[in-house]
Amino acid sequence: MRRFAILFAAAASVAVFAAQPAAGALFFLFEPTQVKPGDRVSARLGGTPRDFDASDRVKPFQVPIRLYLVPASAAQDVHSRHDSRLVAAATIVPDKNGHGVTTFTVPDLKGGEYVAAAWCPGCAPYSRGRTFFTLPVSADIITNLRPRMVLQVEGRADSSGLSPLVVGLLGAVSMLAVSALAVFLVRRRGQARSLKSTARARPAHVLDQALLRRGRRPRRALCGVLTARRGLARQGEDGSFEAPSQPRCPRFE
C-alpha cells in the first residue's frame, strides 16, 4: 500500500510539472535568431522537441499563452502586459505535456536584441497568481540555450535613406525656403494695399497708367467706380447746382 502511495505521488508530481510550463520554467527558443523585419520566426516552449509540430500536440490543450517581444535592455523594467515597450508577436497553445510551437512574422522593430515576454493566465495557480512574465537571459540559464532565447533584429533602414548630415542640410534648406516664401507673401500683401491706396488717391487715368506699368490691363468697371466719386453735384456761386460731369474712362484696345 505504501509503495502504491509513493508511485501515486510521483505520478501526481509529473502531472503538475507538465501542466505548468510557465511556473518558474517558462522560456521560449527562437529559430532563426538573426532576423530582420518581415522574416518568419519559429518560437517553441522550452522542453518542446526541435522537430515538434503543431499537429503533434496531445489533447487536452492548455490555456493559450500570449507571446511578446521586448528590448533586452528594458526587460527587467517591464512589469505589465500593457507596457508600451512590448510588441505582440504570437500565441502559443500548449498541449497536455506543456509542448507548444508557433510561427510569426517579425514586426517592424528597431534594430537590437529582443527577448520574450509572456502573458500566461494558466500559470496563475503555480506562480502565486502571477500571469505576466518577462524572460531576460541571465547567467543561471544553461549556456547552450542562451543564444536561442535572444532575437537579433537587424536595424530597419532610415525612411529617407540619407545620412544625418544630409537630413540636417535638407532641414535648413526647407526653413530658408519657408522664410523666403513668407517674405514674398508679406511684400505682395503690401503691394496690394499700396494699390488700393493709390486707387483711392489718384485719378483714374493716373491709376490706369500705373496698372499698365505693372503689366496689368485696367478694367473699365474699376475705372467707373473710381471716377464716379468725382461726379457729385457741386453748388455754383449763384446758388444753383451744377450737374456732375460724366465719368470718362480711357479706351484700351
Image (cartoon, rainbow, N blue to C red):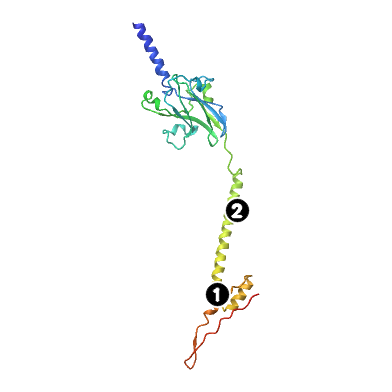
Residue 103 position in % (x across, y down): 52, 28
Give the residue type that dot 1 points to: Ala
Instruction: Report the residue marked by disc 2.
Output: 173
Image coordinates for residue 98, horizontal then vertical, percent: 45, 21
Mark toward the start of the polypeptide (2 vs 1)? 2
Q: Residue furthest right?
A: 253
Q: Foreground mark, 2 or 1?
A: 1
The x and y percentages for residue 143 are: 52, 22
Spatial CA distance of label 2 from label 1 is 39 Å
In which quadrant of the rendered view does residue 222 lie? bottom right
SS for tag 1? helix
Apparent side of residue 53 relative to residue 127 in the rendered image (left or right):
right
User: What residue is drawn where x is 41% and y is 18%?
Assistant: 17
What residue is rendered at 55% in x and 60% in y?
Answer: 182
Q: Image quadrant for the C terminus?
A: bottom right
Q: Where 76 falls versus 61 (above or below)?
A: below
The residue closer to the viewer here, 48 or 219, is 219
Compared to residue 108, the image places residue 42 above or below, namely: above
Q: Is residue 188 left or right of residue 59?
A: right
The residue lying at 40 percent from left, 16 percent from top is 15
Q: Which quadrant holds the N terminus?
A: top left
The residue lying toward the viewer, choosing from 59 and 184, is: 59
Query: Where is residue 83, by image quadrant?
Result: top left
Mark 2 element type: helix
- Residue 93 x, y percent position in the rendering: 46, 25
In the rendered structure, which amino acid carries the disc numbered 2? Val
Residue 78 shown left or right of residue 253 in the figure: left
Q: Is residue 69 left or right of residue 125?
A: right
Q: Which residue is mark 1?
A: 199
Instruction: Decide: is 234 above or below 20.
Output: below
Q: Residue furthest bottom?
A: 238
Mark 2, Cα crowd under 10 Å, few <14 / some 14-19 / many 20+, is few
